[in-house]
């Protein structure tokens, strides 16, 4: 497609899929269960980390974990004692288990002990690194600075090692992107939507290649950079809004 035709097509698909009805089919419904910013951040963080596999399972397991936290994740993160943490031991989602959950709670406790919100924390981290991929890599180092089992590190990707970092890019989209229709939250003002990278997955990558937005054959960080750069040519201020168009078309339509 020519650029004008491509933008017109993607804008139409954006209108089709960036709608409140999208929420009920997507893991973004989990943070939408909450009102307090910290609860939205924590539940969104876990829902994004669990976002691999079938979406109904992701949603069910995310709700399971929130229920183990009494549907008050911020209070649980701050005040859980050893008895409370026992509730997490039997939790399993794919390769994420109770040991991983315990470390995530302790690491989040450390972050919230030193920051009012994750938005404050990531804002300072972005100021330090001045780019999203460097920020994500730095976040992973800090998140695992407390004692942990090495296996737990696999649940947070590092773009500097070639990963698409799809799950953290999706979490950042939820928290950063201003969305008049209310699917994304736009809670964080310290990072601009223009700095975000597409949360590339097999669905969005497949459609992007068919539309000529992505030539790279491998789904890795170089592919994320390529497609995001091309989307910035269509909308430099909000390139990842087209994630709705690409993902929605890939999942819900025969293209």
Image (spheres, helix red, strand yellow):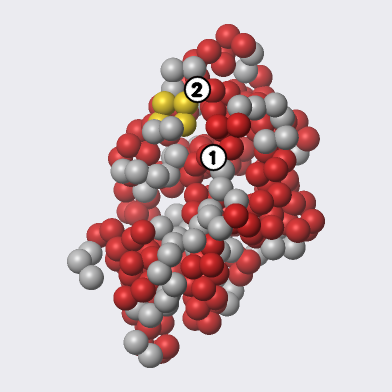
Residue at 49% x, 41% y is 49
Q: Residue furthest left?
A: 254
Query: Circle 1: is it few (<14), some (14-19), or many (20+) Cα within 10 Å?
Result: few
Query: Circle 2: is it few (<14), some (14-19), or many (20+) Cα within 10 Å?
Result: some
Q: Position of residue 92 (x, y in %)?
A: 41, 26
Q: Nearer the viewer, residue 48 or 220?
A: 220
User: Quarter-wise, where is residue 243 in the image?
Assistant: bottom left
Q: Position of residue 129 (x, y in %)?
A: 76, 58
Q: Give the number of callouts.
A: 2
- Asked whether the residues under the numbered discs 2 and 1 touch, taking CB atoms below 8 Å apart as contact, a structural biologist would say no
Q: Which residue is mark 2?
A: 98
Q: Mark 1 falls on what kind of element?
A: helix
State how far apart marks 2 and 1 are (Cα): 14 Å
Q: Nearer the viewer, mark 2 or mark 1?
A: 1
Question: In the drawing, does residue 155 fall left or right of residue 251?
Answer: right
Task: Give the vertical position of 5 relative to 33 (above or below).
Answer: below
User: Quarter-wise, where is residue 211 in the image?
Assistant: bottom left
Residue at 53% x, 55% y is 163
Task: Give the vertical position of 137 relative to 91 (above or below).
Answer: below
On the rendered image, what quadrant is the C terminus found in?
Answer: bottom left
Task: Give the vertical position of 244 relative to 150 (above or below).
Answer: below
Residue at 70% x, 43% y is 141
On the rendered image, what quadrant is the N terminus found in?
Answer: bottom left
Q: Mark 2 falls on what kind of element?
A: helix
Task: Look at the image and tell me whether residue 70 can be seen.
Answer: no
Checking the image for residue 154, the label placed there is: 1
Q: Earlier in the sequence, mark 2 or mark 1?
A: 2
Residue at 51% x, 73% y is 226
Q: Nearer the viewer, residue 122 or 12?
A: 122
Q: Position of residue 77 (x, y in %)?
A: 62, 26
Q: Nearer the viewer, residue 21 or 106?
A: 106
């Amino acid at each position: 497609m020519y650029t004008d035709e491509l933008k017109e097509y993607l804008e139409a698909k954006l209108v089709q899929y960036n709608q409140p009805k999208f929420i009920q089919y997507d893991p973004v419904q989990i943070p939408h269960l909450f009102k307090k910013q910290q609860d939205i951040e924590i539940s969104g963080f876990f829902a994004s980390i669990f976002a691999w596999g079938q979406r109904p399972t992701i949603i069910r397991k995310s709700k399971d974990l929130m229920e183990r936290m009494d549907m008050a994740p911020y209070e649980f993160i701050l005040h859980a004692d050893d008895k409370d943490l026992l509730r997490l031991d039997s939790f399993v989602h794919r390769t994420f288990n109770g040991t991983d959950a315990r470390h995530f709670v302790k690491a989040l406790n450390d972050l919230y002990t030193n920051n009012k919100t994750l938005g404050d924390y990531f804002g300072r981290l972005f100021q330090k690194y001045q780019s999203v991929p460097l920020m994500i890599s730095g976040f992973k180092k800090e998140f695992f600075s407390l004692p942990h089992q090495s296996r737990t590190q696999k649940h947070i990707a590092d773009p500097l090692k070639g990963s698409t970092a799809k799950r953290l890019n999706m979490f950042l989209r939820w928290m950063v992107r201003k969305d008049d229709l209310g699917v994304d939250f736009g809670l964080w003002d310290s990072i601009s939507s223009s700095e975000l990278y597409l949360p590339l997955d097999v669905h969005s990558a497949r459609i992007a290649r068919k539309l000529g937005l992505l030539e790279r054959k491998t789904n890795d960080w170089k592919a994320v950079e390529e497609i995001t750069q091309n989307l910035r040519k269509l909308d430099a201020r909000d390139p990842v809004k087209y994630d709705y168009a690409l993902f929605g078309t890939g999942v819900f339509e025969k293209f």
